[in-house]
Amino acid sequence: TVVVFKGAEEMKPAVLVEVLEEIIPKLIGDGEGGRVLCFTKSVSSTQRLTKLLMAMRPELRVGAFHGTLSDTDRAKLLEEFTGDDRMDVLIGSDAMARGLDLKSVRCVVNYDMPMFAGTYVHRVGRTARAGQLGWAMTILPASQARSFKQMMRGDLGKRVVEFEGHDVLKWNEVGKIEVEEESIDVK
């Protein structure tokens, strides 16, 4: 699923909150978002988004996974994410895009568009493992939609599932966010 929003880049965190609270639960169909991995473009973006999301929604259990953590801190964070007393959202850089087999990841959100198709494949490969269902969602400002479509068509040649939901997302604290939801259907 691709969520393309019109407006300033500064609206992106509000779009992420709407995705986590409204779109993912409806997409999955069980009324809950499940465990969500959220990918950013860098360590600093991961740290910033984690702090911002925690401030915007203190009830969400959020963690930051990135390459500057020690092995011990990474292991502890992954245990919190996969354990019974679960973390809701694990935000990370591409350090968690490869080699992690995390059970019960329901959805991967690309908060920042990956630079390469291969990175996209590794990110979304963290869900829908071992025959389980999973979802992948990419949040894009309108200015990046064309580049993303070209990457998907040119490098991947795969079909991305369309989410038939809201035409407009509403955010009651910061006004209205206009969102286009598009399907990328490649032959």
Image (spheres, rainbow, N blue to C red):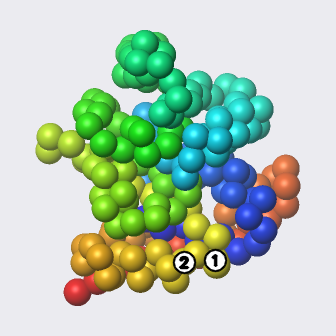
Percent coordinates x, y for residue 176 in the rendering: 79, 65
Q: Is residue 129 or residue 96 the one in the foreground? A: 96
Identify the amino acid type marked 1. Answer: Ala
Percent coordinates x, y for residue 85 in the rendering: 46, 13
Determine whether, in the image, residue 133 is placed left or right of residue 72.
left
Quarter where residue 79 is shown: top left
- Give the residue number, with chain letter if any, for mark 2: 145
Question: Is 187 rendered above or below residue 174?
Answer: below
Q: Residue at x 72, y 27 (%)?
A: 58
Q: CA distance from mark 1 to mark 2?
A: 5 Å
> As drawn, which residue projects farthest toward the right?
174
Question: Is 168 rendered above or below residue 111?
Answer: below
Percent coordinates x, y for residue 175 in the rendering: 84, 60
Quarter where residue 157 is shown: bottom left
Q: Residue at x 36, y 57 (%)?
A: 119
Mark 1 nearby-residue class (10 Å; few <14, some 14–19, many ≥20): some
Identify the amino acid type marked 2. Answer: Ala
Q: Residue at x 43, y 34 (%)?
A: 35
Q: Which mark is residue 91?
A: none
Location of the N terminus (image quadrant): bottom left
Instruction: Verify CB contact (< 8 Å) between mark 1 and mark 2.
Output: yes
Location of the C terminus (image quadrant): bottom left
- Give the residue number, with chain letter if any, for mark 1: 142
Mark 2 nearby-residue class (10 Å; few <14, some 14–19, many ≥20): some
